[in-house]
Amino acid sequence: MNYENIISSSENGIATVTINRPTKLNALNKVTIQELHHCFNVLELNAEIKVIILTGSGEKAFVAGADISEFAHFSVEEGAELAAQGQELLFDFIENLKKPVIAAVNGFALGGGLELAMSCHFRVASANAKMGLPETSLGVIPGYGGTQRLPQLVGKGKAMEMILTAGMLTAEEAKQYNLVNYVVPQNELIDFCIGIAQKIMKNSPAAIGQAIKAINANFKEGVDGYKTEIKAFGKCFGTADFKEGTSAFLEKRKAEFIGK
């Protein structure tokens, strides 16, 4: 499918999804959110794709925020619906994807952009990246999961400070507060993420999907993460990947996983 605002490519089992609105610093609008949902859904169903890298076009921004012009005149009801739809279509959707999604944060990740990066399974930042949730400076709060995911990553106190001051973190500060896993030069960002993806691809896709589900369960209200882990652990025993992995270990050979 040809998209208006994103570019999707794949090679050797790794898909790269690039948000491509450079004149708007890759700001998220309704069309982009719909396209990302469709693209991630297609990639999850594609058995050849094992890992997804999400990034922004150009050298200035991953995603500089939501497209404010689309909702500046919304009513209370429309605002709530905007947040609900966005979380369901994209942010929660990515978080619960069975395939790992790495955010390659190549510049500004502000507002909805940082919320998008936080919905990915982990983040790698370029040295010039800056991250923040400036919504309170616009008279609103983060609505795409930012008030929930940021405290999970950086702690309640730092999240409170960031959201209430509308301040930004540098890439190195983001790493210090565990918001990103690594900081690398911008020209090395995608290759670095590919390197991590290649390490992931050596392991069982079936087990990886269950691991993502179990880890996420710890952060979901009303869900017992330990029980989810036990159930997911048991499910692994019924997979071809488990039989192959254990057989390969005992036979002292490299496992050939099929993801089932």
Image: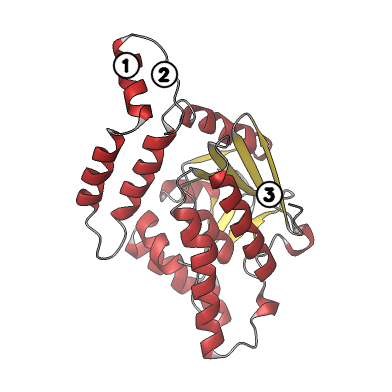
Q: Position of residue 120 (x, y in %)?
A: 49, 51
Residue occupying image coordinates x 63% and y 69%: 66
**Sequence-earlier tag: 1 or 3:** 3
**Sequence-earlier tag: 1 or 2:** 1
Q: Is residue 175 left or right of residue 6?
A: left
Q: Determine whether the residue tagged by mark 1 lies in a helix, strand or loop.
A: helix
Mark 2 is surrounded, within 10 Å at the Cα level, by few (under 14), some (14 to 19) or many (20 or more) other residues, namely some
- Quick check: marks 1 and 2 in contact, CB under 8 Å? yes
> Quadrant of the rendered structure where residue 237 is?
top left
Judging by the rendered image, the residue that carries numbered circle 1 is 247
Q: Position of residue 75 (x, y in %)?
A: 57, 90
Question: Does residue 34 appear in this view?
Answer: yes
Q: CA distance from mark 3 to mark 2?
A: 32 Å
Mark 1 is surrounded, within 10 Å at the Cα level, by few (under 14), some (14 to 19) or many (20 or more) other residues, namely some
Residue occupying image coordinates x 62% and y 40%: 15
Residue occupying image coordinates x 34% and y 64%: 157
Judging by the rendered image, the residue that carries numbered circle 2 is 255
> Quadrant of the rendered structure where residue 259 is?
top left
Residue 158 got which mark? none
Specify the amino acid type for callout 1.
Answer: Ser
Judging by the rendered image, the residue that carries numbered circle 3 is 18
Q: Is residue 176 left or right of residue 196?
A: left
Q: Determine whether the residue tagged by mark 2 lies in a helix, strand or loop.
A: loop
- Residue most extreme to the top: 252
